[in-house]
Structures are given as structure tokens and as C-alpha cells.
Amino acid sequence: MKTVESIAKNLKNKKIILRLDLNVPLNKQNITDSNRIDKIIPTLNFLISNNAKILILSHVGRPKGKVIKEFSMKPICDYLKKKLNQNIHFIKTDINNLKKQDLFYGTNQSILMLENLRFYDGEEQNSEEFAKSLASFGDLYVNDAFSCSHRKHASVSNITKYVPSYAGIQLMSEITALKKVTKNITRPITCIIGGSKISTKIKVIKNLMSKFDNLIFVGGMANNILKNKNFQIGRSIFEESCDDIVENIFTLSKKENCKLIYPVDVYVGKEINGSGSVKKISEISEDDLILDIGPETVKILSKIIEQSKTVLWNGPAGYFENENFKNGSLEIAKKIAEKNKKNEIYSVAGGGDTVAALNNFGLTKYFNFVSTAGGAFLEFLEGKELPGIKALE
């Protein structure tokens, strides 16, 4: 792929169509999590420093082709203005009625933002006409929205047919980080995987099993393993009808020589907002909820992380939102951070809950890469070809 950094000398006064993922949670027009916006600031500063003119394209929510006020890009535009300390001109005009000459006509119009792309059916339908219209607004196109690149949408896929196209800084950093846990691996490599549904991540597990030395199950994932091994899990979260999947994972692990690890002790409670106590996995009662990994399990995981050179983490170890059940996730994060400070490990974390946990602990900066991509992150790990990446190649 050609990168926007490779053409830095040619950006002056060029009109850049910049696809970003600014799909952040809004509560009455207030941004409740700005992570995705903050991560693309380096790209914007790079383009500004090279005197480019910038047209920002993005979406919020799922308005499904209808104009819905609460999904307007306006509050995000206002946030970016303050963050960049730059004037950003917000364009409300219907994109279908816009012409190239309507843009960048004033001296204070070096950065523009269009309204929510998903207000238009053509975006999610990957319409050729809509893509062609978007492409007509600039001289170059830059995709810096890795987290949207698994979508075959007009502003991600078809647009590249009609305008010279480049990969953005954030998109390239995401690909580079994920390649370090899927292709260009420094061993030993460990994957810590959680989440409530094992079926949603089975393709990731199968794709990576041959590449990983250790696969650690935590959270709801571990409950499925424990249940399959005939341990009592009480009222804990688990996924129905997954025994065949679990058996398949164990069979594959032997074939690929990948060690599987799951909890030997846990914190249990009677309700998620209450207190907890430590139990061995053989001591769990019918009315217990498993809400975190226990201290013996933490010791085992810490030792594995200590011996690892690369680690991928997707899914917290417990219900970290409750102080009583955050210890497992916190200790995992602290151990990885400790190794990272010594430059002894390459660490990648991804998934909304994992990112939220790291932010909660204040340890995000001690990971080599923290991905805010959801579906694209998992699909890349599955080995799938992402339409947005393919379009740039």
C-alpha cells in the first residue's frame, strides 16, 4: 500500500479526502469516550503541518440512511476544533447536492467536515455513484479508519476506484501492530482471550492456534471451558451448546502444540455489584457467580507473561467495573506494563472492554498498541481480507 507519509512533499494545497472513524458514544450531544478521536490527532497534525486542505468523512451510530439529529457529527466537529485549536467548517449541505467548487472557497476553510455519511443509503450500500461523488470532492483520498475497513462501504471501498488513494498513519500503525502478533512474531507468544461468547472468537482461535505458544482463557470464555470439564459454574455467564467447539479447541491445541490455560481458582459472588470470596474451581456452589480469576491463577498467568516476548490481550479477566472483581485484569495489565517498561515484551490489546479496563487502570500508555477497532480487529486476527485494506493495495 502507498502511505500518505510517503507523499509528504506533495501535499501542499492538495485537497485530502480523509476517512476517519469518529464513531464515538454520545449522550445528549456529549462525547462520553473520546479514544477514537484522540488516536487520529497525529494524522490531522501531519496533514496540517504539510499545508494540506482536509475534508473529513466519518459516521456515528446506525441511522440507516435517515437524518437523525442525535447522530449528527456536529458535537464531534466542535470537540476536534478545541483539540486541534483549529477552525473546522462543518458542512450541513446534503452531500448529493454538493459540488467540488462549494468546498474550500474561503481563506478560513482549510479543514472541513461533512455530516454523517450514514445519513445516506449509498454509504452502506457501497454505491458506485455515492463513492464517485465523494471522490470528486478532493485530489487525494486517505483511509485512516482501520476500524471501518472490514465494511464494504462507499467511503471505504469503492471510493478508491475514482481518486488516488493512500493509507493513513493510524491505519498503518494498526496493521503493523497486528502483524507482529500474527506474522512477524517474536516468540514465545501468549494470547489472553476473554469475552462472553466463545463462538464469536472461535475463528480467531483456530487461525492463531498454530502461531501461539500459550492460549489463556479468562472471563466468560473460561466458564465454557470449566463447564465442559464438568466443573460447577453456578449462575455464571456462559454460552449454550458450545461443547463441540471446546472439544475442537483442545484437539487442535494438541495438534499445534499450543498450551491451553484456564483458571484454577476464582472470585465468586452472589451478585455482580456485591463482594466476593476466593474459591478453587472444585468448590463453586450452584448459586455462585464467577466474577474474576483468583490469586493462584494470577500467579500462573504472571509467570507465563514473564516468560513471553509477545502478548495479545482481548477480553478482561473479570467484572472489573466492580472494585471487588478487578484484581485479575489489573494484575495482568500491571505485569505486561512492567515488562513493557523494560522493553522485554511487545504487547497488543484490543476490544472495547479491554480498552476500558486499561483506561480505568491508567495503564494504556504502557502497551505497545491498543486497538479501538472492534470487528475489524477480530476479522484481521481471523485472517480475513478486509475490503478497506484490499481497496488500497
Image: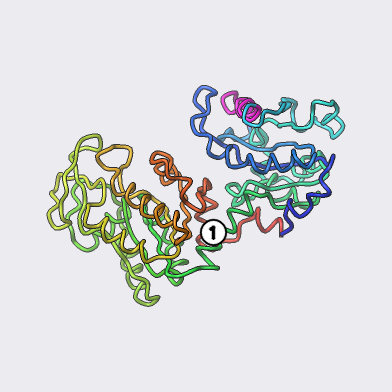
Residue 51 is drawn in which quadrant?
A: top right
Q: Which residue is drawn at 70% across and 56% down?
A: 391
Q: Is residue 300 magenta?
A: no
Residue 149 in the figure: left or right of residue 352: right
Q: Is residue 250 above or below residue 276?
A: below
Quadrant into which the N terminus falls: bottom right
**What residue would you read off at disc 1?**
178
In this rendered view, identify the residue nearer to me: 242 or 329.
329
Q: Give the range drawn in magenta.
A: 66-81
| Image coords of residue 184 (percent x, y) | 55, 68
| Image coords of residue 362 (percent x, y) | 42, 40
Amino acid on which disc 1 is placed: Leu
Quadrant into which the C terminus falls: bottom right
How many C-alpha atoms fall within 10 Å of the one at disc 1: few (<14), some, or many (≥20)?
Answer: many
Q: In this view, does 80 lie above or below 295?
A: above
Kindly state the secondary structure of the residue where label 1 is placed: helix
Residue 154 in the figure: left or right of residue 313: right
| Image coords of residue 67 (percent x, y) | 63, 27
Q: Is residue 141 above or below residue 104?
A: below
Count of labels in the image: 1
Given the current orientation, which residue lies at the most extreme bottom position? 255
Q: Which residue is drawn at 45% across and 70% down?
A: 187
| Image coords of residue 364 (percent x, y) | 46, 45
Q: Does the magenta stretch include residue 74?
A: yes
In this rendered view, identify the residue nearer to me: 299 or 209.
299
In this rendered view, identify the residue nearer to me: 21 or 359.
359
Residue 131 is drawn in which quadrant?
A: top right
